[in-house]
Structures are given as C-alpha cells and as structure tokens.
Image: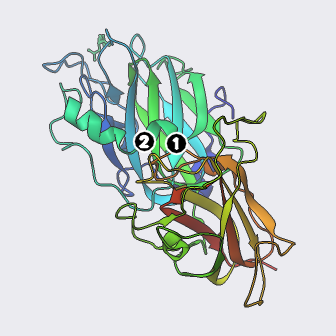
Amino acid sequence: MDGAKNESAEARESYKDVSSQKNGAKVLFATDDFFAVAENLLKEEEPEWNENYTEYGKWMDGWETRRKRIDGHDWAIIALSDPCELRSIHLDTAFFTGNFAPRFSVQAAHLVDDPKPIQDRRNKMGTAATDVELEKARELKSEDWDEIIPMTSLRSGHAETRKHVFEIANPRTYSHVRLNIYPDGGIARLRIFGSESTGRQLLLRSECVAFSNAHYGSPEVLLEASPSKGMHDGWETARKTERPWKIDLDDSGFIKAYGEEWAILRLETDVCIDDIQVDTTHFKGNCPDSVKIEAKLSNDEKLHSSDDSWITVLPKTKLVANRSNGLTSRNVVATKQPVNHIKVTIEPDGGLARIRIFGSKCRH
Ligand SMILES: NC(=O)NC(NC(N)=O)C(=O)[O-]
C-alpha cells in the first residue's frame, strides 16, 4: 500500500473500475449527505470546481458530511458493480482544502444475498441517516467486514496532494465495501479497481457422508444457496451432557478440551477452494466457540473423520454468533489441489446456518 504514490494509469488500463456508477456500482447507505451526496464518489468524470453555494453550504463535487459534534464517524456502504478481486483503491480529495476527511479506512465483504439499498437515495442532500435507516444498515454488520485498508491519513485537495493510491497486497474477492471517514469531511472520488475472478463459482450442492451428531438439524443444508430461514434451517447438535462448570481458555482464547462435533460433506464437483464463509445467522445462544474446515479428494464412499490426510482450509477460528459471515475469510488457506469433500469441525457443540465454499476448477 502506498498513499504517497500518484494515481497509476496502469490500474485503470489493466483492471475494471468496479466503483463507477456507469458500471453499475451503487451507494446503499451513507450516515450523512449534508453538503454533498455520497453518489458523487462514484462519478466517472473528473471532479469539478464551481463557485456556487447551495442552500446547505458551498457546492462541492464529492461526498461531504457535516462537522460532527457528536461521537462516532461517518461511513458509507457501496455495492460494487461486480464481485471482483480488489487490486487498488484510489481516492481523490480534489478541491476539499479546508474540509477534506483527515483519515479514512476501507472494509469489504463478499455478500451472496445482494442487499437492497437501505435508504431511498433520492434527495439526500441536506440530510443525515435517520435512526431507522441506521438500524437497518447495522443489520449488515459492516463494522465486522474485513479491513482492506486500515485507518490512514489523507492529504488536502490541492493539485499536488489530492490523488491517493493504495495497492492491495493480497487481493480477495469482494462485492461490497464500507468507506469510513474519521471523523467527517469530504472526499471527491473513490475508484476501486479489481480483476474478475474467472471460473469462480459458489458450490451449492452437497451430500452429507457422515456426522457425529445432528440432533436438531442436518449438516446437508449447510451448503444450500438460499439464506437460512431460522434455527431449524441449519446444522445444530445437542448440548454436550458432560459440561464443565468452569471453562478454561487456552492462549488463543479458545475453550480448552471441551469436545467437538463434526460433519463430512461431499461437494458436487472437484474444485480448488479459494474462500469460505461461515454463516452463524439465527444461532445466538448456541453458536459454537470455534470452527475448523478441512478438505480432501477421495472416492471413498465411507469417509470418516478419523481418516488422515485432510488439508486444513480454515484453521480453528473463533466464531461470532448470529453473523452472516461469523469470521473473517482472511484465515482461509486456498487449496492448490482439487478436493471433493469438506470436514467441518465445531467446538464444543452448537449450530451453524450455512457454509459457503468458493472455488474454481484447478489449473494443472
Ligand atoms: N466553506 C466550506 O466549504 N464549508 C463547509 N463545507 C461546505 N461545503 O460548505 C465546511 O464547513 O466543511
């Protein structure tokens, strides 16, 4: 990442601009659009200067929020034109000289269920998000999305300092971004460049080969495409009867030696896995402490959890209850060889709504 670099023409040529309105990117939500609306961030045209004033203040070509007199910071959620491997992010503070956002960060998620705009985005100028809109936006849990650019300072919108370029070192596929500005202010343009993840697919069907416990729901539904409808529409094990009264945690904060449950699923095709999402929606008081996912290629009809040579795709990872991606996909280790089975191990017990496996045909 290099905020001091000038805008790279190379990115514009080799990658797609997935944040441009013309290509179909959309603002789903912004905390505040007082001086100038967040849609301006997505315009393809270069920012303009105009002497005029609107009824709210100085006319500005960008997203500009009010000066905050309360706690918190402003943020906006943008649906990218296509899910893409994000390569670089370009910010332009043009003409925001005494009112540019001093710091920003970017978070991102790959959302499968394409959320609708949270606000009616017409006539937003002069307004801030209502409590109801804010509540709805919070349902996306975007504060937990992967941080792809940590909090970083911005420079003023003078000609020599306005352009900022940030390369993304480990590109992953994302469909939505959250732009945070700290605490408030203006940014003229946001450009996000990505490369299409060709051949990538969401693996939908699976067959459950074996499991340790499925008291309240079958592991087979874990790879369904549709969002889970409730706790009944997920894999949920019974509580372990031998439960300690006091629980010890290991150095990483995991519950120590309290047992596990597992399920093995056969995928519909052989793939190289490159991303996994674990969805704990609806499992609030019964979310597992952690999950681990392993994979393997096998024609054995009776695969069992004790079989060896499983490849770890998601190392043991702490889960967050009731989240559409209850962990960060940054922990996922892509498989270099094709696999056709996954083994999901939860500790100590509990329920999961969905597991989404992203993969593509392996190149040999
Ligand atoms: N002169 C200004 O730009 N003032 C304010 N901004 C606009 N757009 O009026 C502000 O305080 O940030």
**Residue 298's image quarter?**
bottom right
Q: Residue at x 69, y 58 (%)?
A: 260
85 relative position to 122: left or right: right
The x and y percentages for residue 152 are 59, 23
The front one of 198 and 36 is: 198
Q: Residue at x 55, y 72 (%)?
A: 219
Q: CA distance from mark 1 to mark 2?
A: 7 Å
Q: Indicate the secondary structure of the residue bearing disc 1.
A: loop
**Residue 94's image quarter?**
top left
The front one of 39 and 322 is: 322
Q: Indicate the secondary structure of the residue bearing disc 2.
A: loop
Q: Quadrant of the C terminus?
A: bottom right
Q: Residue at x 39, y 61 (%)?
A: 113
Q: Quadrant of the N terminus?
A: top right
**Three-letter amino acid code at disc 2?**
Lys
For residue 154, say whether it is visible: yes
Residue at image mark 1: 145
**Residue 134's image quarter?**
top left
Ligand 1 quarter of the rendering: top left
Residue at image mark 2: 141
Q: Residues within 10 Å of mark 2 (few under 14, many from 20)?
A: few
The x and y percentages for residue 291 are 65, 54
**Three-letter amino acid code at disc 1?**
Trp
The front one of 273 and 224 is: 224
Instruction: Check whether the beta carbons of the residues at disc 1 and disc 2 lie within 8 A of each other.
Output: yes
Q: Residue at x 28, y 36 (%)?
A: 135
11 relative position to 42: left or right: right
